[in-house]
Amino acid sequence: MISEHETVIELSKKKVVLLTIGASIFVALGIWLLQLQFIVGILAIGFFGLCLVFSVIKLFDKKPGLILNGKGLIDNSSVVSAGFIPWSEVTGFSIFEIQKQKMLVVGIRNPEKYIEHSSPLKRIINKANYNLCGSPVVITSNTLKMKFDELTSLCNQYFMRYGKISE
């Protein structure tokens, strides 16, 4: 806690290292699969190769993973992070779960803004998030020094305190 009105959640280097190791193993598995099932091998190498690149980028990222304050939230939890989102643009939070992986979905008043104002790769991922969960902004605790339930509770507390004021 930086102050009464700001909470800074650091990136967990331990979690990012584990993600990097996991992605490396699956890239190696994809290379091995090339011999048996070429298409599956290529897909595994492509997907987990991107995960590997993204996790290495996060490994050297010095910025906090998430900041919550009276003005809004600053998302830096993933490579496709949204950056600053003022409370006036947040409509609430919900939970989306897939394969026992929970994600905190940030409801946004103008999702197209967060889809269109990004790089081509981010745009594809943000559009997929929007189609899958209803918002381009999705936060997991996979890279944060915080458990998912704590993250959800904290975000909801800030939204209840500051989000309703800006409506």
Image (cartoon, rainbow, N blue to C red):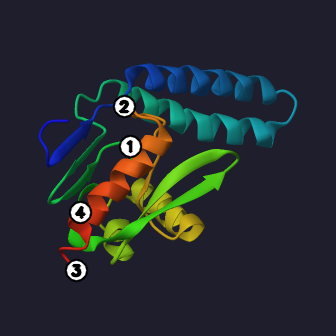
The three-letter amino acid code for the residue at tag 3 is: Glu
SS category of the residue bearing label 2? helix
Query: Which tag is nearer the camera, tag 3 or tag 2?
Result: 3
Q: CA distance from mark 4 to mark 3?
A: 12 Å
Please report the residue visible at 51 percent of the width from the left and 71 percent of the height from the top.
134
* Total marks placed: 4
For marks 4 and 2 on the same chain, the one whose residue lies earlier in the sequence: 2
For marks 4 and 3 on the same chain, the one whose residue lies earlier in the sequence: 4
Residue 167 image label: 3
Q: Quadrant of residue 122?
A: bottom left
- Percent across and percent down for residue 89 are 27, 72
Q: Looking at the rendering, in which quadrant would you find the C terminus?
A: bottom left
- Percent across and percent down for residue 153 are 41, 50
SS category of the residue bearing label 4? helix
Residue named by callout 1: 79
Please report the residue visible at 36 percent of the width from the left and 58 percent of the height from the top.
156
Residue named by callout 2: 58
